[in-house]
Amino acid sequence: MKPEETVENYGKTHIYMVGMDDNPQPGHIEGIIKSIKHDNIFSGGKRHYEIVRPFLPADAVWIEIKAPIDAVLAEYSRLIQEDKVIVSFVSGDPFFFGFASTVRKKLLGVSMKVFPYFNSLQMFAHHEQIAYENMHAVSVTGRPWHELDRALLEYRPLIGVLTDRIHTPDAIAKRMMEYHLDKDYTMRVAEHLGNPEKEKIYKTYPIEEISEMSFSNPNCVLLMKDPDSTQQRPALGIPDTKFVLLNNRTKMITKAPIRVIDLSLLELHDSRSFWDIGACTGSVSIEARRQYPHLDVRAFEVREECESIIRANARLHSAPGINLHIGNFLDLPIEENTAVDAVFIGGHGGKLKEIIRKVVSHLDNRNGKIVFNSVSEESCNLFREAVKENGLKLHSEMNITVDSNNPITIFCATSKDHV
């Protein structure tokens, strides 16, 4: 049975999820094990096994929770089909970025009982006597940077971060410095919380100092913003002169007033994913990333020399997390099930119809939007024809002239079921 399939016979509790900390003598574990009617099947990570081993029966079967998780879930599923009961040990609260959420998502219908414990960020806040009701908690444990980037771009005053062996406190600090997001933040780090022999707290270090340190795992992080800081999200419409340009060509950038209109038409506040095709300097992607940190932003650019320009501009304007693809958009592989709901076409290399055809194959049927800036009557006609051929709706068409530049026609097309 595949992990994501529905588990039958779920009236009986098949999984007991027990939260714990790093204490080598967890007082609550023995009582919980004795209270559960179970087969001798237990599960958890290596660290959990070392802690709970003294409390397990001699004939205990242990299923290690490790990558690939689908293999672990397949074994869980097989045992549940045999009407077995599994006692699973996890860190902290199983539903706080935890294994219980994965089980609930993948083993549909399985009956589960949870014995939660304090998660590490709660324990850290308790230790430091910090009120944490407004903490913005994120996890980079086996996950990309996206949610941490988002929290920093939203200037959250208190950010709690669950780390791993790659996304370490010093790696977090280096990333913050690279994108100039370290201003007014300090960091506290906690190692081995709950373990009286190994627990260590690093109090209120500057980000630059943290970037040069190393830490023992497991650990977690508190990022604290200076309460007197006045730094806020920048206004929409970064001046053109503040971007690194391609060969210093001022015409190779979407002008700030046009950029503002483009982003408005794309309705990015109500979008989940955004593609910038023909990104060049990255100005549109950077504005989108800064103003709408929740977005999954992908920038496509055919010119190899633009890669360093886009990355430099992203660092300059504090826009981490732009997923950059260098190469011909029509040749770049995109996963079949990838959906996008907002697309800006800034360059097309004479292949406008082909680009739109590929975009439409991934465009959300209800909320999809395509914005295109045209500088010629030929490309205007090509866009109108492509809209009709692909069953889109021409939502708006406006002519704009900025200073002494050539007139630009801004098109916005939407998917056929767009409301």
Image: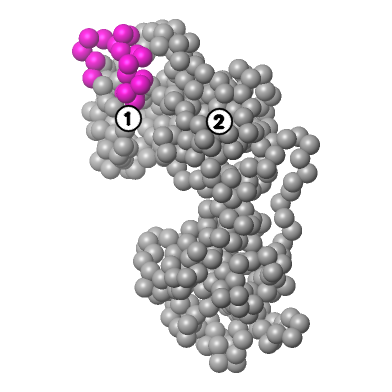
- Give the secondary structure at mark 2: strand
Give the amino acid at mark 2: Val
Q: Is residue 409 above or below residue 176?
A: below
Q: Amino acid at mark 1?
A: Ile
Question: Tag 2 or tag 1, which sits nearer the N-term?
Answer: 1
Q: Position of residue 344 (x, y in %)?
A: 56, 71
Q: Position of residue 133 (x, y in %)?
A: 67, 28
The disc placed on residue 221 is 2
Q: Which residues are magenta?
A: 43-61
Is 50 left, or right, of 184 in this rendering? left
Q: In the rendered image, which residue does mark 1 sit on?
A: 65
Q: Nearer the viewer, residue 347 or 172?
A: 172
Residue 380, image x, y percentages: 58, 88
- Where, by quadrant of the figure, is residue 336 drawn? bottom left
- Expressed as whole percent of the image width and height from the top left, the position of residue 300 reads 48, 68
Q: Residue at x 45, y 42 (%)?
A: 143
Q: Is residue 52 magenta?
A: yes
Mark 1: few/some/many CA within 10 Å (<14, 14-19, 20+): some
Q: Residue at x 58, y 55 (%)?
A: 315
Against 330, is 172 above or below? above
Which image quarter holds the C terminus? bottom right
Q: Is residue 147 visible?
A: no
Question: Is the residue under label 2 in contact with that under label 1 (CB below 8 Å)?
Answer: no
- The image's colour scheme reads one colour
Using the image, determine if residue 228 lies above or below residue 246: above
CA distance separating discs 1 and 2: 24 Å
